Image (cartoon, grey):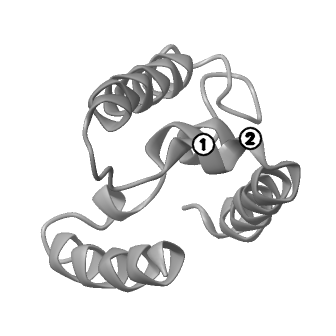
C-alpha cells in the first residue's frame, strides 16, 4: 500500500515540480553521476554527486529517528528485518535506477 501511495504521490509531486524545473523531478545525485563532467564521460568525479548522495543518506537517517520513537510510524522499519522485504525493495530500487539512468538528460 505504501509503495502504491508513494508512486501515486510521486506522480503528483513530479507533475507540480516539472513546470518549475524538470530537473527537480529526478534523483539528482545519480542523474548527475551519469552526465559528463569535465573531461570524463561520466560525472561521478563531480563533487556535487557524492555530496548529494551523502546528503540523501543523512536525510534518510534523520527520517528514521522519529520513526523509531512514535507509536504509529509512517514506515514500519522492523519490516526491513525480513530478508524478502529488503531484497524486494532493493531490487525495485536497482530496477528504477536502471530504467532511469539511460533517460537522464
User: Where 28 sits versus 24, above or below?
Assistant: above
> Percent x, y for residue 98?
79, 62
* Left or right: where 94 falls relative to 4: right
**Element at badge 1?**
helix
> Percent x, y for residue 2?
46, 73
> Percent x, y for residue 82?
79, 49
* Left or right: where 102 falls relative to 78: right
User: Where 42 sits versus 35, above or below?
Assistant: above
The residue beneath circle 1 is 78
Q: Residue at x 42, y 32 (%)?
A: 60
Which quarter of the image is occupied by the C terminus? bottom right
Residue 81's disc is 2
Q: Residue at x 63, y 36 (%)?
A: 33
**Element at badge 2?**
helix
Quadrant hosting residue 42: top right
Classify mark 2: residues with Cα within 10 Å, few (<14), some (14-19) or many (20+).
few
User: Where 26 sits versus 69, above or below?
Assistant: below
User: Where 42 sits versus 75, above or below?
Assistant: above
- Nearest the viewer among 40 and 19 is 19
Q: Residue at x 33, y 33 (%)?
A: 63
- Nearest the viewer among 45 and 56 is 56
Classify mark 1: residues with Cα within 10 Å, few (<14), some (14-19) or many (20+).
few
Q: Residue furthest front?
A: 71
> Percent x, y for residue 74?
33, 56
- Nearest the viewer among 84 and 34 is 84
Please say if the residues under marks 2 and 1 sit with CB atoms less than 8 Å apart. yes
* Left or right: where 67 falls relative to 42: left
Residue 42's disc is none
Amino acid at each position: 500500500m505504501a509503495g502504491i501511495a508513494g508512486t501515486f504521490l510521486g506522480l503528483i509531486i513530479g507533475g507540480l515540480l516539472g513546470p518549475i524545473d524538470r530537473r527537480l523531478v529526478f534523483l539528482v545525485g545519480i542523474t548527475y553521476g551519469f552526465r559528463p563532467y569535465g573531461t570524463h564521460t561520466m560525472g561521478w568525479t563531480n563533487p556535487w554527486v557524492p555530496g548529494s548522495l551523502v546528503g540523501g543518506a543523512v536525510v534518510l537517517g534523520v527520517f528514521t529517528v522519529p520513526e523509531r520513537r512514535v507509536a504509529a510510524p509512517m514506515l514500519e522499519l522492523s519490516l526491513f528485518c525480513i530478508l524478502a522485504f529488503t531484497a524486494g525493495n532493493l531490487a525495485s530500487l536497482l530496477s528504477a535506477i536502471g530504467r532511469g539512468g539511460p533517460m537522464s538528460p
